[in-house]
Image (cartoon, grey):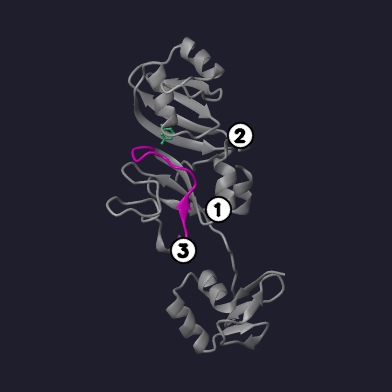
């Protein structure tokens, strides 16, 4: 049994404010198991009860998972006094309370970012114990060498002595490379290339696990992920 207040159910299902929820309830438009119910504190069992607005069945989803193609210049945070954040640019139709990015991409990094209100999920994805591969495309100020590929394979030691887990480095073109890592240390990719004397001009995350950024998702745009998509992580 999973009990939640009717007003919360309606406001989440319709993605509307508390004030609008109150009004809809007051107007007697919400039916629970066929009975018009006006009380916001009425407890709904989300597993067995059917809530409708008129003839439309309302679905209560506690958590939302959003995939964004993060643009450069936007901060990976929920809110910030000065800078625009990834949560600020989510379209209203997907906005919820408590959204935050799952891990961080640097302000100038672009590409796949998941934003959710599900803390347990975020924890699982971020934890190095989960061993989830993240693939980045890096534009560099020089070419990679076979020696660098071997060094990354063994595990780079960062300037401060931190040892990274083995990473896969592949040539993607002149002065560009694909790098696959399984952890998410602060500025990790830039610092890893720094140890072999290469600067990163541009960084773009292409995938997490087998969830890839859709080719047609424009920079700054978002889509809601399905349970099927989440299985890919
Ligand atoms: N590594 C970095 O250096 N920056 C990012 O944004 C992500 C990984």
The x, y position of residue 78, in whole percent, is 40, 54
Q: CA distance from mark 2 to mark 3?
A: 29 Å
Residue wearing tag 3: 97
Residue wearing tag 1: 119
The residue shown at (54%, 86%) is 29
Image quarter where ligand 1 lies: top left
- Above/below status of 109 relative to 28: above
Q: Which residues are magenta?
A: 95-109
Badge 1 or badge 3: first in the primary sequence: 3
User: In this image, 192 relative to 7: left or right?
Assistant: left
The residue shown at (41%, 63%) is 92
The residue shown at (42%, 15%) is 144
User: In this image, 165 relative to 3: left or right?
Assistant: left
Residue wearing tag 2: 131
Q: CA distance from mark 1 to mark 3?
A: 13 Å
Q: Secondary structure at mark 2?
A: loop
């Amino acid at each position: 049994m999973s009990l939640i207040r009717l007003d919360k159910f309606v406001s989440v299902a319709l993605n509307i404010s508390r004030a609008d929820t109150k009004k809809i309830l007051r107007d007697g438009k919400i039916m629970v198991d066929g009975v018009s119910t006006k009380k916001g504190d009425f407890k709904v069992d989300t597993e067995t009860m059917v809530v409708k607005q008129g003839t439309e069945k309302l679905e209560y989803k506690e958590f939302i998972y959003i995939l964004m193609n993060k643009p450069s210049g936007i901060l990976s945070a929920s809110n910030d006094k000065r800078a625009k954040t990834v949560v600020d640019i989510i379209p209203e139709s997907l906005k919820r309370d408590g959204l935050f990015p799952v891990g961080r991409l640097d302000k100038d990094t672009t590409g796949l970012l998941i934003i959710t209100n599900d803390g347990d999920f975020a924890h699982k994805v971020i934890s190095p114990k989960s061993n989830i591969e993240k693939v980045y495309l890096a534009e560099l100020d020089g070419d990679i060498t076979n020696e660098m590929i071997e060094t990354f394979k063994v595990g780079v030691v960062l300037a401060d002595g931190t040892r990274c887990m083995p990473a896969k480095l592949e040539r993607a073109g002149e002065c560009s490379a694909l790098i696959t890592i399984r952890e998410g240390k602060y500025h990790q990719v830039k610092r890893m290339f720094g140890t072999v004397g290469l600067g990163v001009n541009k960084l773009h995350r292409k995938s997490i696990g087998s969830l890839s950024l859709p080719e047609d998702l424009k920079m700054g745009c978002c889509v809601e992920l399905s349970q099927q998509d989440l299985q890919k992580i």
